[in-house]
Amino acid sequence: MTSYPVRTLYTYYLFLFVLLYNILFCTHAFSQEHPNLPLTGGWFHINGKDRDGYIIGRRYSLVLGKTDNNLRNTISFNCSPSKEKQSYVTFFIPKEINLKEIYGKEHFAEKKFKLYTLSHKGKTGEYIVSAEVIGNEIFLDFSNDQKDAVASILEASKIYLLLSGQKHPIEFFIPDDSVTLPFEGKEFKFNDFVRTMLDRDGSFSRQLDTDYFFRTCSDLSAWRIQ
């Protein structure tokens, strides 16, 4: 039996993933007009804390761009280790969308965004939020009058973000459980497939639920019991 390098097998299975994604979710490659990206239902945590003591949860999407890196961390949540620091969400907008071209510059200390969310329980949310923009990263703090918005992102099964006024929407959604993807002769749900890809090099990922953040993040836990 022929033996293939791990990297070759990974590339092969990711190719199958991309092929199935095209069949199941869209009829064309990545759309810059209205990207609609599958999103992991859980927040993945790898290793310990960052250098500032934050516990970081990540949600991943498949982005059909021009690079080999199709599986990407598109949303992260930095869980505050103490009352002196704020928790915050980061949207990593795919590089295929040129935010500098849309905005005219790479950095905004504060920029308004329109945000819509749908929770796992069917609760809808509509928010105007303020965020810092650095390159293609959008940082949204758990602070002031936008705590509800950040909490809704943590619980969201769908997220619809308008990048500029009422224009340039980007949408994230959790695929239906009936969608399965092949790996090593088995069928995996989207979430499980992503975790398999994350752990293929020997890393150990944990999947964190929303309750974990509300128990662990100092500012979220204090806000929830008010």
Image (cartoon, rainbow, N blue to C red):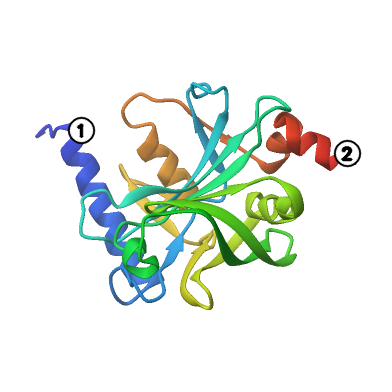
Camera-near label (1 vs 2) is: 2
Percent x, y of residue 187? 40, 50
For the question of whether residue 52 can be seen, the reply is: yes
The amino acid beneath tag 1 is: Val
Quarter of the image that includes the N terminus: top left
Left or right, residue 178 beside residue 61: right
Q: Nearer the viewer, residue 15 or 149?
A: 149
Q: Which residue is mark 1?
A: 6
Label 2, secondary structure: give it: loop
Label 1, secondary structure: give it: helix
Which mark sits nearer the N-terminus, 1 or 2?
1
Above or below: residue 179 compared with residue 92? below
Percent x, y of residue 226? 90, 41
Percent x, y of residue 103? 39, 66
Q: Residues within 10 Å of mark 1 (few under 14, many from 20)?
A: few
Above or below: residue 38 compared with residue 9? below
Q: Nearer the viewer, residue 113 or 49?
A: 113
